[in-house]
Amino acid sequence: MSAASAPQTQARLPLGPITPQTPLPPAIQAWKVYLQDQGRSPNTIKAFVGDLNLLAHFLPPERTLGQITTRDLNRFLDWLQHGRGVPCSTKSLARRITSLKAFFRWLHQYGVLVQDPAEKVIQRSAVSPLPRVLTPAEVRALQERAQAHRQQGDARPAALLGLLLETGLKKSETLNLYLNHIVLEGPDAPAVYVRYAAPRYRHKERRIPVSQAWAQVFAEYQAQYHPHERAFPWSPRRLEYILENLGREAGLDKRVSFAMLRWTAALHDYRQGMDPDELRAKLGLSKMQWREVGLKLRRLDAITPQD
C-alpha cells in the first residue's frame, strides 16, 4: 500500500488526527511525542524540534502542512545561512536538513502528505574529522604488554583491553557493565549483554558474543580482584590510565583511549566483512548515526595499514 493510500487510522498520531490542513506547530508537537515513543534521546528531540520551530517561525502563520513546498524549504535554508543574522555552521545546517527530511518523510509515510516536499532538498553532509585508530601491528603490541601483565599475576589490563577490542563498547557502557551482564557459561555463552536503566535507551540494548579466550582472561581477573557488582569498579580516569599505560609500555606514539579502541574494533569487524546492519547493531547505533560511521569506516579502511 502506498503512503498516499494509507488508512486514516495511521494518521491518528498522539495529539489527534493530523491532516494536510493542520498548521505546522501542532504537527511538530505530535512529532515530538512520536520521537519520544521511538526512544530518541532528549538532546536529539530537543534539536529536531528546535529546527522545526525555526521553520514555523519563518513561514507565514496561516501556512498549513499541505501548502508547504520544496521552494519554501529551500528559502528557509537560505534564510538560515544568509538572512537570520545568526551564524549557521555547516554541521548545524546539515542537521537542520536532516530534521526537515525526517519530519516530512514521517508525514508522507503516515499518509498525511501525498508528496514529500523535503525529498528533493539537497542533503549537505558535515562529517567530523576521522578518528585515530590502531593498526594491527599496534594492536598486537598492546596485547603483548597486556599478556605480560597477566603472566605477572595481573589480568586486569588484558581483561579490559580484550573486552574493548572484541565488543567495541563505549566508555559509559563499560563503566555500567555489571557482572550479571557477562555470561561465561551456558548455551549462549560466552557473551556480554549491554543494558540501560533508562527506558528511552532500550533500543541500544544488545547481546555481543565474546571469545572463549577472553572469557578465560576475565575469570582470572575475577579471581584476582573479586569485583562484586560492576565488572570494572574503578573511576573512568583510572581505567583510562590503564589503557594509556599499555600504550606507553608498547612504545606507541598514540594516546590509547576508549574511543580509539571502539573505532579500532569497528574497523576490524568491517574488514572481516561483517554485515553492515549487524555491525551497526553491535555498536548500538541508530540508522541515522550509522550513515556517518559507515562513511568513516570506509575511509579508515582505505588509509589504515592492514599489517
Image: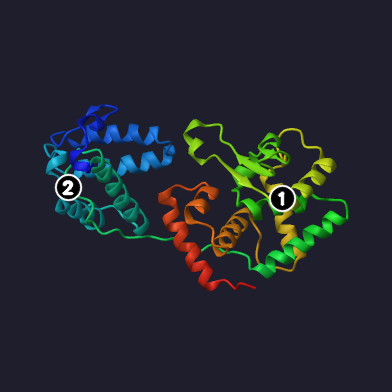
Secondary element at image label 2? loop
Residue 275 % position (x, y): 50, 56
Please tell me in which quadrant of the rendered image residue 125 appears. Answer: bottom left
Q: Please, is residue 240 above or below residue 302 in the view? A: above
Q: Is residue 292 left or right of residue 163?
A: left
Disc number lying in front (2 or 1): 2
Q: Is residue 60 left or right of residue 258?
A: left
> As drawn, which residue projects farthest toward the right?
152
Of residue 7 and residue 80, the one placed in the foreground of this image is 7
Q: Amino acid at mark 1?
A: Leu
Secondary element at image label 1? helix
Residue 21 % position (x, y): 13, 34
Please tell me in which quadrant of the rendered image residue 150 appears. Answer: bottom right
Rendered image: mark on residue 115:
2
Placement of the C terminus among the 4 image quadrants: bottom right
Placement of the N terminus among the 4 image quadrants: top left
Q: Which residue is at 70% across, 53% downward?
A: 162
The reply to whether residue 253 is visible in this rendering is: no
Of residue 19 and residue 176, the one placed in the foreground of this image is 19
Of residue 41 and residue 76, the one placed in the foreground of this image is 41
Q: Which residue is identified by label 1?
A: 160
Q: Earlier in the sequence, mark 2 or mark 1?
A: 2
Residue 151 % position (x, y): 87, 56
Q: Amino acid at mark 2?
A: Gln
How packed mark 2 is, by other alpha carbons closer than 10 Å (few <14, some 14-19, many 20 or more), is: some
The reply to whether residue 208 is visible in this rendering is: yes
Label 2 close to label 1 by CB (< 8 Å) = no
Q: How many marks?
A: 2
Q: Please, is residue 199 above or below residue 170 in the view? A: above
> As drawn, which residue projects farthest toward the top?
16
Spatial CA distance of label 2 from label 1 is 51 Å
